[in-house]
């Protein structure tokens, strides 16, 4: 681990420089007691973009260091309260998962599993490092009877979590080279004995609810759309994970998932279309329609081996987020505002 940490500045020079700069910015805010620390909330997405560009284009990689400069002169508060801020973090995660080259299903899922596990490992390492450093500082202050200065803890903890935490994560992701290793025993236990059984139980619950709706002939509850979205997401994750497993106990389920997913998707679309017809589009409902289209397409893509491309699914998700969140005129927010304005004018 010490060798890994000592080699970080050489392997990730721009990420290191960016971390140091944002640490200095954080110290300036701390010393001046200013509460306007909006720029710090953009740090992790900027780091993820820089890390991704490091394997794409060297010039773009170096240039990415300066992206924060114009942001210092912009009032970021309106953006921080918008859906664009949330989806910026989603896109940052997708960048890490999608990788820097085209991969077949097996290599992509292995890469995604590797990145996810390394991120959790980095958080664990950083957490343990934080506890150790806090213990050392507390002991030092106590033994030498130094007056407790909470700023000392803040200075050190900000350095650990702003500078070291992302770099440890990046180093662990790259630790095993370009090819991610096979999932370990713990991962297999999670996939075989936790995730897939939970998805099957989830399916049974949704099917019972679908039968109830069919018998009573009533509309699904509004929150069911979110349940179906979580169900499809978990099932797609389980389906992808099968490519990592030597023994596939649940191929009988995932192999027929396109048909299995039909009733839950019907619940999703019926409830969503009914509310759109009643109350028109809002920003959230536009996103729900986009999510429904993506889910339906992804489920159909599972039907044939030739169209079952998980990396392409992630790319499509990222593209949809960019189109309906950041392109003026067709964002979910602008569509929702236009529809609600038109609805009010019609009511009048």
Image (tube, rainbow, N blue to C red):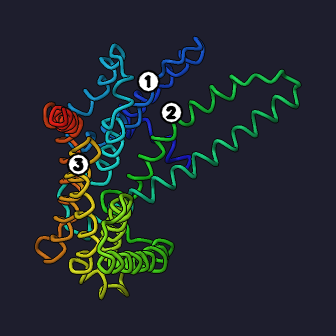
In the image, is residue 105 above or below residue 17? below
Rendered-image quadrant of the C terminus: top left
**Residue 56: image x %, image y %?**
21, 43
**In the structure shown, which secondary structural element does the residue marked by tag 3 occupy?**
helix
Q: What's the CA distance linking mark 3 and mark 1?
A: 24 Å
Confirm whether residue 325 shows in the render. Answer: no
Q: Nearer the viewer, residue 271 or 191?
A: 271
Dividing the picture into quarters, in which one does residue 200 lie?
bottom left
Mark 2 lies on residue: 162
Point out which mark residue 318 bears. 3
The residue at 38%/34% (across/down) is: 15
Confirm whether residue 157 shows in the render. Answer: yes
Q: What's the CA distance linking mark 1 and mark 2?
A: 14 Å
The residue sitting at the front extreme is 348
Mark 1 lies on residue: 38
Mark 2 or 3, nearer chain start: 2
In the image, is residue 61 above or below residue 259? above
Mark 3 or 1, nearer chain start: 1
Q: Nearer the viewer, residue 171 or 122?
A: 122
The residue at 53%/15% (across/down) is: 28
**Residue 298: image x %, image y %?**
20, 65
The residue at 64%/27% (across/down) is: 154
Which numbered mark, 2 or 3, is in the foreground of this view?
3
Dividing the picture into quarters, in which one does residue 80 lie?
top left
**In the structure shown, which secondary structural element does the residue marked by tag 2 occupy?**
helix
Q: Is residue 42 left or right of residue 150?
A: left
**Residue 76: image x %, image y %?**
36, 22
């Amino acid at each position: 681990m010490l060798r890994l940490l000592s080699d970080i500045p050489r392997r990730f020079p721009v990420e290191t420089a960016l971390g140091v700069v944002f640490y200095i910015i954080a110290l300036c805010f701390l010393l001046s007691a200013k509460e306007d620390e909006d720029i710090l909330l953009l740090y992790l997405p900027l780091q993820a973009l820089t890390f991704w560009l490091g394997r794409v284009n060297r010039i773009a990689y170096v240039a990415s260091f300066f992206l924060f400069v114009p942001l210092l002169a912009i009032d970021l508060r309106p953006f921080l309260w918008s859906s664009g801020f949330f989806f910026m973090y989603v896109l940052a995660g997708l960048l890490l998962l999608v990788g820097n080259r085209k991969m077949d299903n097996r290599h992509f899922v292995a890469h995604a599993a590797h990145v996810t596990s390394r991120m959790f490992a980095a958080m664990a390492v950083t957490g343990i490092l934080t506890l150790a450093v806090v213990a050392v500082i507390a002991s030092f202050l106590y033994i030498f009877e130094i007056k407790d200065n909470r700023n000392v803890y803040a200075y050190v903890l900000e350095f650990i979590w702003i500078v070291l935490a992302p770099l440890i994560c990046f180093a662990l992701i790259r630790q095993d080279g370009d090819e991610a290793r096979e999932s370990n025993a713990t991962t297999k236990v999670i996939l075989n004995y936790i995730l897939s059984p939970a998805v099957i139980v989830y399916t049974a619950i949704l099917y019972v609810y679908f039968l109830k709706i069919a018998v009573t002939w009533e509309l699904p509850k509004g929150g069911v759309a979110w349940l179906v979205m979580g169900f499809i997401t978990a099932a797609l994750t389980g389906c992808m994970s099968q490519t990592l497993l030597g023994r596939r106990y649940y191929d009988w389920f995932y192999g027929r998932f396109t048909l299995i997913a039909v009733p839950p998707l019907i619940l999703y679309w019926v409830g969503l279309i009914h509310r759109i017809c009643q109350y028109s589009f809002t920003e959230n409902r536009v996103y729900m329609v986009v999510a429904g289209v993506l889910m339906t397409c992804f489920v159909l893509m599972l039907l044939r081996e030739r169209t079952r491309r998980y990396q392409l699914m992630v790319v499509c998700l990222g593209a949809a987020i960019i189109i309906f969140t950041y392109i003026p005129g067709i964002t979910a927010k602008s569509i929702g505002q236009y529809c609600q304005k038109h609805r009010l004018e019609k009511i009048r």
